[in-house]
Amino acid sequence: MTDSAETPVIRMEVARYRPGEDAEPVFQAYDVPLMDDWAVLDGLTHIKDRLDGSLSFRWSCRMGVCGSCGMTVNGEARLTCGTFLTEYAPGPVRIEPLKGFPVIRDLVVDIDDFLAKLSSVRPWLVREGEEPPLTAEYAQTPEQLEAYKQYSMCINCLLCYSACPVYVLDPDFLGPAAIALAQRYNLDSRDMDDRFDVLNLEDAVWGCTFVGECTKVCPKHVDPAEAIQRYKVSAALRSVLPWSRR
Amino acid sequence: MTDMIDVLIVGGGGAGLRAAVAVAETDPALKVAVVSKVYPMRSHTVSAEGGAAAVIGLGDTLDEHCYDTISGGDWLCDQDAVEAFVAEAPRELIQLEHWGCPWSRERDGRVAVRPFGGMKKMRTWYAADKTGFHLLHTLFQTTLKYQDIIRYDEWYVTKLVVDDGRVHGVVAVEIRTGRVETIPARTVVLATGGCGRAFPFTTNAAIKTGDGMALAYREGAPLKDMEFVQYHPTGLPFTGILITEAARAEGGWLINKDGYRYLQDYDLGTPTPEPTLRSMELGPRDRLSQAFVHEQRRGRTADTPYGPVVYLDLRHLGEEKIEHRIPFVRELCRSYQNLDPVSDLIPVRPVVHYMMGGVHTDLDGATTVAGLYAAGETACVSINGANRLGSNSLPEILVFGRRAGIAAAEFARSHREAEPAAVHSQGEDERRRLARAREGGGNGGRIADLREEMQHTLEGAAGIYRSGDVLAKAADTLAGLRERAEEARVEDGSTTFNTELINLLELHAMLEVAQTIVACALNRRESRGAHQRTDHTDRDDAAYLAHSLVHRAPDGTPSVGLLPVTITRWAPGERVYGRD
């Protein structure tokens, strides 16, 4: 490791918003060491630990799976644990909260709207009749698993909502992750629902204008845009042939 | 003050959510709440990778899973607990399957299993190498079906309300608003995970700060076997990100800087091209991490800016197998280590991963405080003894999360009396204490400095190898740190999403737990499993075939005693790996 005297620094311009104190968000600049292996998140924890204990942001696993640390980095929705400072050298790099959500404080946004939307699509395995005894699994071939696997990879980081031009204008839009997770169950061979009542709505799949930003920003390659388009096809089919499912 | 909760669960990871569903299914009339400092799907269960063990047939038997677990734990497991665990694990994994968990499959549609360290049979169910992620999201999404489950998302529990030996609820702060509330409850289930963040180099998420252990310990419930800290042999240097044992189960090799499969020098068997169960790279984690230290002393590790490393070699597995079976390993290596395991060696070193110890409970998760339960890594039942086997912790959170939920529901049904006056008075005291902590703003050191000093003290004294004199010094250092932490500087006076205040409370919890780790390690003058003393190198069954039980003395210092191990059918013997 290099001496601190030799370590280059990068300026991080961080959006601050303290309700009751700031009328609107302001940027505060901090100089942090520009280390090869530091993620943007490492820069933020450096600020919190060494420079300013009052900076608030969420983080936890720092390995791209808990979904806590999504923020806007130089205008793009990113997971800050997997986005490296060197990408923005020599700087400055701007860190803002995820767009499209109410800001609670600094880099922390209110995601309760998503939680409510997730609940509304019945994101659980819907079965009819009694559950069989817990002595054997439902059979599911690797191909059947593959049919929905991609949509099950969503970590709820909400970068897709932040990037979605529809959601920004219409907060009632069900949104990419919730639809992808509904499809995760719809396409599961063990599931017996098609969630038509909650998906076949103007504010659900038909609200999507197919810009595809959700898929571009998804760090887990879930491809919510494809999930939505596929449902449009099956919903249209069902409208023509009311007895058809999926 | 809110309405009385019947079962209040602290922690929304696998154990907590499994408990919540168990209560909701057992008795829908009961009020159940989950209080978690993060949204439940952010919980650290999400990071578990390799798999979940349960006997599923294929020539496997419950007794063999028991034996692997007990010998893996160096005979410190309570065998009645292991038998219950092993018997109930299969139905729990099937239950998860029925709830939609995307387990990896065989061609004919059955759930697939893979080998795992210390296991003599293939019995580890997996969802590629994101098993914990899928398990947690399946559980969380399933809880959404039970709309009566009350969620306190991003609330941090600061205190258990205990009066006359019985729990009556919790005091918690809503992080978003700073509001402090007393939540009365007939029972409380602690499911907050472990405390890996008390160490400097860990696979654990930032949230793993020993909160539940400290909450119970402060109210008189003893902790158990706290000296047993699991080092996982394969963490990425710098980040500590876990490279799953599944990488070795799929055929990966551990090699030193000379390209030599060094485990053969440490009584772990002889190298074979294909993985051999309970041998070499599929030995138990404690033995593999200890072998690393010996390699380092022999000068056969490679130096990096982040310390000595050995290498995990997956190149011979080929791209297809890596993509299919362990895609997350590849993703993590590419994103965080700038290498591709298809063509490059992965530098790895041992990293703090899991606490075998925790809140002392019985088989139903009950602690010594009436109405207080614990499950998962927070608890010590004990099925893990002196060393947990990989892929036993996911079934553990399910089996004992469910058990604790059912037992708590039963207790809540049979204890309907009104809350005592102590609930209100303790709540008010706690509210004042928290306001002082936030507004007072001590003039002492930075929280981060105190935390780092604690972490390095623990690593130096309670790492892979320990000795009495270093431990004794560490006990003094930690006592001093606790006093200094009372004066820690808090710069953030805000009530809105004040994470600095939470960090301070977490530091207090970790210091409390750190002291118990050192005290238990000091008291155990033998070497067993993950606890290796350079001044007492042999296992001593005559003196220490017993759990460490640590109480908090009135002056706040840890007081350690012993509790006999429950032996049912497997007499203590030699741990044999790599030879029959």
Image (cartoon, helix red, strand yellow):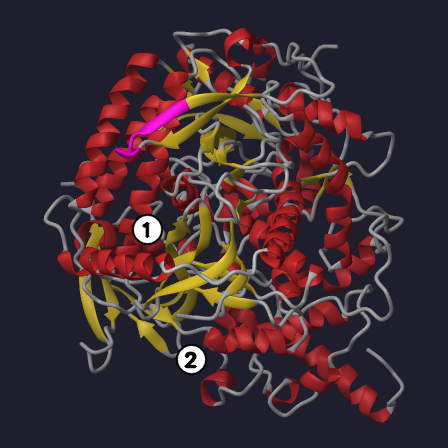
Circle 2 SS class? loop
Distance from Cα at disc 1 to Cα at disc 2? 25 Å
Name the side, left or right, on which A86 lies relative to A133.
left
Does A109 appear above or below B389?
A: below
Residue B172 in the image: state x and y as whole percent. Answer: 37, 60
Per the image, is B557 magenta? yes
Name the side, left or right, on which A129 lies relative to A201.
right
Please indicate, yes or no, whether residue B305 appears anywhere in the rendered image: no
Name the side, left or right, on which B232 lies relative to B248.
left
Q: Chain of mark 1?
A: A
Q: Which residue occupies the foreground of this view, B216 or A125?
A: B216
Quadrant for the C terminus of chain B in the image: top right
Q: Residue at x 82, y 57 (%)?
A: A143
User: Callout 1: few (<14), some (14-19), or many (20+) C-alpha neighbours within 10 Å?
Assistant: many
Q: Residue at x 60, y 61 (%)?
A: B140
For residue A42, the mark is: 1
Circle 1 SS class? helix
Please indicate, yes or no, whether residue A165 appears anywhere in the rendered image: yes
Q: Which residue occupies the foreground of this view, B291 or B472?
A: B472
Dot 1 or dot 2: first in sequence order is 1
Does B58 appear above or below B399?
A: above
Please give the range of residues in magenta: B554-560
| Callout 1 amino acid | Asp
Please give the residue where the numbered disc 2 appears in the rendered image.
Answer: A100
Q: Which residue occupies the foreground of this view, B533 or B25?
A: B25
Quadrant for the N terminus of chain B in the image: bottom left
What is the quadrant of residue B84 in the picture?
A: top right
